[in-house]
Amino acid sequence: MEKIRMKNPVVEMDGDEMTRILWADIKDELILPFVELQSEYYDLGLPNRDATRDAVTVAAAEAIKKWRVGVKCATITPNAQRMEEYKLHEMWRSPNGTIRAILDGTVFRTPIPCPVIRPYIPGWTKPITVARHSYGDLYKDTEFRVEGPGKAELLFTGADGSVQRQTVYDFEGPGVLQGCFNKDSSIENFARSCFEYALGERRDLWFSAKDTIMKKYDGLFKETFQRLYDAEYKTRFEQAGITYFYTLIDDAVARLVRSAGGMVWALKNYDGDVMSDMISTAFGSLAMMTSVLVTADGRYEYEAAHGTVTRHYYRHLRGEKTSTNPVATIYAWSGALRRRGELDGTPELAGYADALEQSVLDTISAGTVTGDLAALMDTRPEPVDSGAFLAAVRGRLEAKLQ
Ligand code: NAP
Ligand code: MG
């Protein structure tokens, strides 16, 4: 079989623990036998992030700017326990946070629809995509412990020397304090990438926030969406037969549960973080959720929405075979290679990505599944380990590509 050629590389970012093991297996079984892979490799595994003082993460983000398409393995975000476990020099920030801060994009998370798995909310017949703003807010906050009585103020010194000042709270005892920010430019990029994505997919766009409470902060998000919609997108949305809809986040949650799904749901950074886990679980499994970071100037970074599956990794280290679901990581690769093919005008590469995804779905439909999915299926098939699942997908892929 002749391997499919690539014109330009994708930026490949390796990661940690169980997903790092799966990463190598996916390449060996499903990619390298079929594609003359061109990738610019960055090792974002925690030992190398520590060794490079996290410079590797920044370099990877810069490479995505250059090559436009990246694919990332799940990575550990260090905490106190990881500091000890990996003997780290510093508690490095979340690599996803660092990359998002450099690229300033929007993360779109979509469940992989699979006919044999019924969503927990039976009315949801179409996938719901969560569009998460990925800049600022709580993820770039400044916070500290207030040790005792005193006055907390919000102080802004303008470049012209002017001063704005407001009391946050007069502490009568110890407490805690937090400051957050966002930027007009980032909010505009967010709104724009959501409108473009919804148009591209021909799906309704919802945006929800809490502007009744955060009148200025969430108010700016709401106004920006509405302003851009009225000025630039209204006609295009009407022509495409789709709608834009703003509602308060609590109202959105209630309406969503009663809906048939199918919409793109735009949310602020923290809301999107939380709601995407709810949506993915409701559709079946966290392991069946894809994630893509899209920037307003057309850069794409694909990954799985789940983490490094630490518990399975410790079992793997004890020599046990694990039944870890590789599907979202496979879809990160197929998404990146399809996009590469579209950008480079190499339809064979996009065709390979389609065949790979179809082979995954056929394998699942035939009842060859990992433990997380077996538990969700009415037929209760006997789960297989990750290696057997990948081998079954490879068999189907070979047949399709011949
Ligand atoms: P996790 O890795 O997503 O795993 C949580 C649990 O979900 C697992 O123990 C497993 O449940 C189930 N699960 C997740 N993915 C699965 C898969 N592919 N196949 C089968 N089951 C799967 O989350 P975590 O344990 O909270 O975090 C572990 C590490 O990942 C942390 O260090 C965190 O910082 C990092 N993380 C990274 C990213 C990212 O890079 N994007 C995102 C989130 C977390 P059972 O054990 O019950 O089988
Ligand atoms: Mg989360």
Image: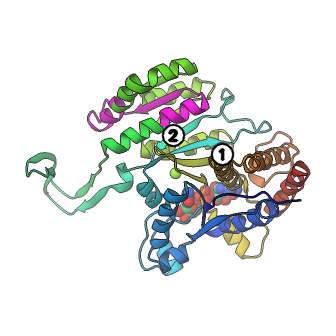
The kind of residue on which mark 2 rests is Ala
Q: Residue at x 49, y 36 (%)?
A: 194
Residue at figure coordinates x 32%, y 46% from the top left: 182
Image side of residue 392 versus residue 333, left or right: right
> Which residue was labeled with disc 2?
131
The crowd level at tag 2 (other Cα within 10 Å; few <14, some 14-19, many 20+) is many
Viewer-proximal residue, 140 or 369? Answer: 140
Judged by depth in the image, the label closer to the viewer, 2 or 1, is 1
Quarter in which the N terminus is drawn: bottom right
Marks 2 and 1, the one that precedes in the sequence: 2
- Residue 195 drawn in magenta: yes
User: Where residue 247 sits in the image (x, y, percent)?
Assistant: 42, 25
Q: Residue at x 67, y 57 (%)?
A: 7
Whether residue 260 is visible to the viewer of this picture, yes or no, is yes
Along the horizontal axis of the image, is 360 left or right of 336? right
- Disc sitting over residue 327 in the figure: none
Q: Is 220 contained in the magenta span?
A: yes
Q: Is the shortest distance between ligand 1 and the CB of mark 1 under 8 Å?
A: no
Q: Is residue 375 visible?
A: no
**Residue at x 51%, y 22% (from the top left corner):** 237
CB-based contact (under 8 Å), mark 2 and mark 1: no
Which stretch did the figure color magenta?
A: 194-223
Vertical placement of 301 versus 267: above or below? below
Q: Which residue is mark 1?
A: 342
Q: Residue 185: x percent and y percent?
A: 34, 43
Type of amino acid under label 1: Glu
